[in-house]
Image (cartoon, helix red, strand yellow):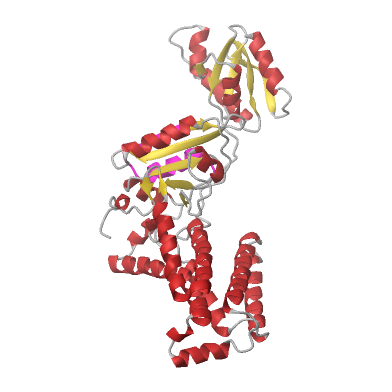
């Protein structure tokens, strides 16, 4: 056992935040070991001494005292290091040469539960997930109180250990889907998982898909609704959101929070989101098709108005469209990266000045500015930021097809996108699957 303690010293002793501390607990002389950055050592020692003061053994021996402190364990070096990294305290009894694994008071490294920052809630619970995985699972259990909700936890990574938890409702989830996910996680336990790209590869999914395989959410209410629909949820430690698996096309249009509105309003809201997606995809391509390739489709009055608005513009419609779309992408990206105190102001002023300047300089038409404004607003109606990114990418395909073949190219682009979406699947479940939404409570 002395050699084991020396191995721990050799492996972790060069860390300034790792402690070996002699202590007297009851009548026993012990060595406390752990990371001071993960453990509140003062409160932990007070708890150990208080535990010993209140200890009333049924037998007066050292083993009874050890059991009162924690779990007597025989562990190898790698297991001990894992315990240390997990914020555990190991107590070494010098006289008996025995290790005891004790629960320690953790350092306060997590923020409090707050309102969501990326998802707005108008009616409903406003608490959101935080970086601590156990807190997130507890919030889900508070949201959906059911004995059928099961949690399976895993440790991934060979160099940097990362805790993953799979949550599912065994009364609603497909057992084959759960088994496939568990099998894939266990077979990839040696892979490092530090971001969603790593997780996608670990689950054996394509990392090149422009449509996200996970529907991310900060809201326990959305996770609870997904569990009832038969989905499985993945939580990764230090990531403040839940990953709903699989992600389906209807997730772009529906929120569980919609059910807090009367049924007619819920239907109208979801229809508006569908209209928003169609506007984002079709409007830029339709402008290019009607201006550059098929102006004969328009009424003569409208065609003359559009021609007059483009008078003096030196570029073809496809060039001015791509140019302004890229400028808009830059503005959106800048609004995401700039500090919150100045970001909205700079991007709003920059967008207004830039739009006015390019129209005055006769670089683009007035109608194009209207089309782009409608497209940007419509794209924001999509549920989920990652889903909106995919829609923003798809509209370029339709714009290019429309520039080559006009209205026929626009239709061909829509067919191409539909064919691509229909080819997507996650663990054997098609992206266009709607049967997994039949578990929704209530109507609609």
User: Magenta span covers which residues?
Assistant: 131-153
Vertical side of 370 occupied by 305: above or below: below
The number of numbered badges drawn on the structure is 0
Q: Residue furthest front?
A: 405
The percent coordinates of residue 78 (x first, y second) are 59, 21
Q: Quadrant of the N terminus?
A: top right
Compare residues 249 and 241 and report the one nearer the observer. 249
Residue 243: give x, y in percent of width and height.
Answer: 46, 46
Residue 325 in sight in this render = yes
Q: Nearer the viewer, residue 49 or 292?
A: 292
As drawn, 387 above or below 296: above
**In the image, is residue 146 part of the stretch drawn in magenta?**
yes
Identify the residue shown where x is 58% and y is 35%.
192
Q: Residue at x 52, y 82 (%)?
A: 291
- Comparing 389 with 104, the one in front is 389
- Which residue is depicted at the point 71% across and 18% down? 10
């Amino acid at each position: 056992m002395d050699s084991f303690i020396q191995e721990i010293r050799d492996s972790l002793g060069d860390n300034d935040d790792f402690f070996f501390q002699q202590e007297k607990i009851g009548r026993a002389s012990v060595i406390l070991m752990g990371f001071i950055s993960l453990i509140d050592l003062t409160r932990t020692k007070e708890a150990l001494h208080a535990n010993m003061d209140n200890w009333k053994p049924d037998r007066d021996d050292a083993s009874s005292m050890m059991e009162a402190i924690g779990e007597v364990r025989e562990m190898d070096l790698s297991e001990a290091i894992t315990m240390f990294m997990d914020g555990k305290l190991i107590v070494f009894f010098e006289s008996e040469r025995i290790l005891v694994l004790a629960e320690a008071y953790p350092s306060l490294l997590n923020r409090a539960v707050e309102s969501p920052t990326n998802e707005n809630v108008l009616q409903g619970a406003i608490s959101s997930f935080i970086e601590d995985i156990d807190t997130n699972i507890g919030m889900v259990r508070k949201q959906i109180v059911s004995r059928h909700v099961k949690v399976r936890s895993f440790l991934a990574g060979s160099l940097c250990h990362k805790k993953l938890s799979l949550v599912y409702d065994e009364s609603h989830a497909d057992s084959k889907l759960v088994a496939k996910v568990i099998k894939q996680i266990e077979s990839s336990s040696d892979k490092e998982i530090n971001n969603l790209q790593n997780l996608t590869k670990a689950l054996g999914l394509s990392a090149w898909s422009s449509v996200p395989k996970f529907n991310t959410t900060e809201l326990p209410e959305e996770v609870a609704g997904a569990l009832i629909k038969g989905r499985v949820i993945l939580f990764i430690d230090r990531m403040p959101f839940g990953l709903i698996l699989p992600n389906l096309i209807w997730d772009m249009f529906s929120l569980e929070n919609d059910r807090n509105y009367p049924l007619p309003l819920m239907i109208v809201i979801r229809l508006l989101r569908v209209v928003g997606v169609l506007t984002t995809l079709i409007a830029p391509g339709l402008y290019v098709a009607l201006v550059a390739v098929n102006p004969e489709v328009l009424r003569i009055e409208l065609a003359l108005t559009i021609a007059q608005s483009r008078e003096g513009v030196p570029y073809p419609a496809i060039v001015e469209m791509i140019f302004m779309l890229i400028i808009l992408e830059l503005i959106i990206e800048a609004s995401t990266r700039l500090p919150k105190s100045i970001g909205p102001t700079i991007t709003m002023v920059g967008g207004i000045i830039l739009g006015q300047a390019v129209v005055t300089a006769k670089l683009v038409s007035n109608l194009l500015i209207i089309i782009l404004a409608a497209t940007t607003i419509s794209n924001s109606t999509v549920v989920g930021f990652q889903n909106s990114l995919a829609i923003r990418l798809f509209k370029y395909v339709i714009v290019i097809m429309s520039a080559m073949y006009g209205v026929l190219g626009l239709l061909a682009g829509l067919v191409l996108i539909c064919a691509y979406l229909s080819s997507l699947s996650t663990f054997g479940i098609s992206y266009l699957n709607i049967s997994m939404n039949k578990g929704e409570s209530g109507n609609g």
